Image (cartoon, grey):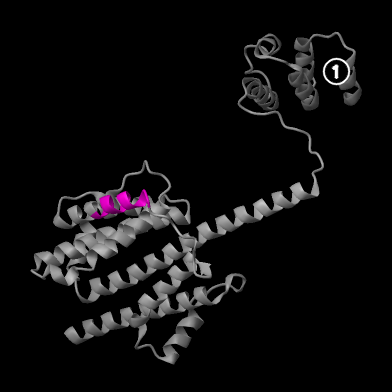
């Protein structure tokens, strides 16, 4: 019945579009409403056919009217009915979808590599705080930038967002370590590697930050290390205008190479591990799932866990020896 009415109204009816519009709304006919709105040829006719006040109409009608309004304004093109495509067009479309997905996979791989780098820094910083600069822990706990960042971390919605915030957290920790050691009179020459750490963390933040309207607490501060960090930021920002990002390193994606570099950096942290310790860690902790298991990920997870475990053991041994 609906089909017959639509055919009649479209071909032979003298019923004005305005009345057809009211009929389709009255009888809740979405198909007829689409047909009526499609027959509206310009904005003037739209103004004549569609009532000024749409509050009483259903959401479906409102959406159809809005869509047609956009089409008439040239903002959106009307949807074309699906048509069969040439095999060559289908092939290129499928190939483009594949390449788009490859780009997505590489993007996610870079997020994964940054997560690995952040884990590495966390392991190193925590052992350093326990064994060398325990006084800096109080500074870190009392730092208002840390409180703000921890709140931001709770409100993140993606791995990339978490990477950006965690990078800032590590920056603030490193700043406090540096400041406390300087206050103790430790030579700054001992911390020549600090700018390199700060630059790496800032680059991670840049790669992963999505919402640039959010505050960046790690930038704030007026101590020496804060000024050093801001100079590093300026240098990196200036370089980023002409730096090119390589998607692969030799025959493998860049993110795989980055994880391998992180593994190499962690190896000295677990030199003392025994085969029994390694086996026990792998047995009682979560590993890479079977569906995503390949060598570089499995190796990183095991070595990162062993490095953290050995760091905790060394810290506990230090505490025991000091008693």
Quadrant of res 174: bottom left
- Give the residues in magenta: 232-242
Relative to 280, 175 lies left or right = left
Rendered position, 76 above or below 219: above
Quadrant of res 51: top right
Q: Is residue 239 magenta?
A: yes
User: Label 1: which residue?
Assistant: 10
Q: Quadrant of the C terminus?
A: bottom left
Residue under the image location 36 percent in, 55 percent down: 205
Relative to 229, 275 lies left or right = right
Q: Residue furthest left?
A: 185
Q: Quadrant of the N terminus?
A: top right
Q: Is residue 28 visible?
A: no
In the depicted view, which residue is nearer to us: 188 or 122?
Answer: 188
Rendered position, 233 above or below 37: below
Q: Is residue 186 visible?
A: yes
Q: Is residue 220 magenta?
A: no
């Amino acid at each position: 019945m609906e089909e017959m009415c639509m055919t009649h109204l479209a071909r032979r009816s003298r019923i004005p579009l305005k009345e057809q519009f009211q009929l389709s709304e009255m009888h809740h006919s979405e198909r007829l409403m689409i047909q009526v709105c499609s027959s509206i040829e310009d904005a003037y006719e739209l103004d004549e056919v569609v009532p000024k006040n749409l509050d009483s109409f259903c959401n479906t009608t409102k959406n159809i009217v809005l869509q047609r309004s956009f089409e008439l304004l040239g903002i959106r093109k009307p949807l074309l009915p699906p048509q069969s495509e040439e095999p060559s067009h289908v092939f290129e479309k499928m190939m483009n979808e594949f390449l788009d997905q490859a780009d997505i996979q590489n993007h996610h791989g870079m997020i994964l590599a940054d997560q690995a780098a952040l884990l590495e820094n966390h392991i190193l910083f925590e052992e350093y705080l326990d064994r060398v600069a325990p006084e800096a822990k109080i500074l870190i706990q009392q730092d208002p930038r840390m409180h703000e960042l921890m709140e931001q971390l709770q409100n993140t919605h993606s791995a990339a967002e978490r990477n950006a915030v965690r990078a800032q957290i590590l920056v603030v920790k490193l700043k406090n370590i540096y400041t406390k050691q300087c206050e103790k009179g430790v030579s700054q020459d001992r911390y020549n590697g600090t700018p390199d750490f700060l630059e790496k963390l800032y680059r991670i933040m840049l790669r992963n930050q999505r919402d640039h309207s959010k505050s960046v607490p790690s930038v704030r501060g007026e101590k020496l290390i804060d000024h050093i960090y801001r100079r590093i930021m300026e240098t990196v920002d200036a370089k980023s205008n002409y730096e090119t990002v390589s998607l692969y390193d030799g025959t493998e994606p860049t993110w795989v190479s980055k994880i391998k570099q992180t593994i190499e950096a962690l190896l000295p942290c677990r030199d003392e591990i025994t085969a029994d310790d390694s086996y026990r860690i792998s047995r009682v902790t979560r590993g890479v799932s079977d569906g995503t298991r390949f060598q570089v990920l499995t190796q990183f997870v095991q070595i990162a866990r062993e490095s953290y475990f050995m760091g905790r053991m060394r810290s506990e041994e230090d505490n025991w020896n000091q008693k």
